[in-house]
Image: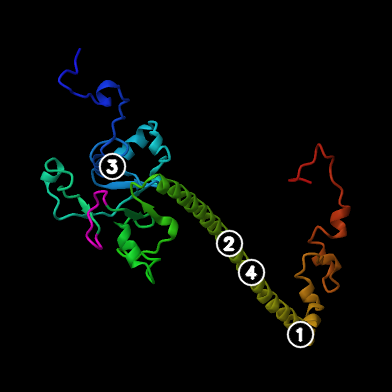
Amino acid sequence: MGCDGGTIPKRDELVRVKQKPEQKDKDAEREFRWLHCALTQQRLEEPIVMCAMGRLYSKQSVIERLLEKEKMPETSAHVRSMKDIKTLQLTVNPAFTDEDKTEGLLDTRHAPYICKLIGLEMSGKFRFVALWSCGCVMSERALKQIKGHTASTCPLCQLPYSVEDVIVLNGNDEDLELMKVKSEMRAAKRKSAKKEKKESKKTETCVKSDSTEETTSTCAVKEEQPSTSSSSNGHKLKVVANPKRLGAVNAMQDPEMKRLKTDFSVAKDPKASDVYKSLFTSHKTDKEQERAHWITYNPFYN
């Protein structure tokens, strides 16, 4: 029946114990996230970009997916346009070779990128952050050490940044929640900046219109001033010129000057003789002359 020879069976040999689920290799999973695109699961190719959640992508694959208008996976559903990604400024590891891509253990391989400030490899063992304002990548340890009077400027490119611009790359669940809050803060900041620009443009246009109105009013005042002065001068000239023109008025009363007028008639001229007046049609003899009937009238004989 078994158990001969004084052998004592163990409980595991007699009772079937529920097997534990297989656990993932944390090191392999970590390396995969840092070396492969989160969208296509293929190896990362430069240029490398990140999303607001800190995941890494190949820029070419993101552009192709956006152009084809294919549905994004749940982890990348927030990427709707090129504004939702940021190109990273990475520092190449001089110790990284082609052999590190395939050969060697995980612990002995070199990462393709490092922190430019303190030289830590970007393999996932150390926490790395990137700045959304400029795209520079550095280790979280280096950023904490540099904090001080230069906390508001990037230590690599010297561009200013704020707290919501610090993105943790490939962070845990707590980091993802924090990244969501920071993305909302950046969106609200962009909206407020747009409103301020619109208001500033409106104020500039109002100031320009006011300045143009003031210039036109000043020009009108300047034009009115010479006109008033010219009118006053005109009155003075009239007053001064009236005595000088008395001789001209007396000259116009001369009968010789009256003949030049259009309403002058020889019949009314007192100095003209009767024979001279009879030469014109205005004479009474011409008016009293008998003429033929209008049917038999001939200007050559009548």
On the image, numbered disc 1 is attached to which residue? 236
On the image, numbered disc 4 is attached to which residue? 216
Proximity of marks 3 and 1: CB atoms separated by less than 8 Å: no
- Secondary element under disc 2, as helix, strand or loop, is helix
Count residues near mark 2 (Cα–Cα under 10 Å), then give few for <14, some for 14-19, many for 20+.
few
On the image, numbered disc 3 is attached to which residue? 33
Q: Nearer the viewer, mark 3 or mark 2?
A: 3
- Residue at horizontal 31%, vertical 53%? 127
- In the image, which disc is placed on residue 285? none
Q: Nearer the viewer, mark 4 or mark 2?
A: 2
Q: Nearer the viewer, mark 4 or mark 3?
A: 3
Q: Mark 1 or 2 closer to N-term? A: 2
Count residues near mark 4 (Cα–Cα under 10 Å), then give few for <14, some for 14-19, many for 20+.
few
Q: Which residues are magenta?
A: 116-125
Tag 3: amino acid: Arg
The residues bearing labels 3 and 2 have C-alpha atoms spaced at a distance of 52 Å
- In the image, which disc is placed on residue 205? 2
Tag 4: amino acid: Thr
Proximity of marks 4 and 3: CB atoms separated by less than 8 Å: no
The residues bearing labels 4 and 3 have C-alpha atoms spaced at a distance of 68 Å
Tag 1: amino acid: Lys
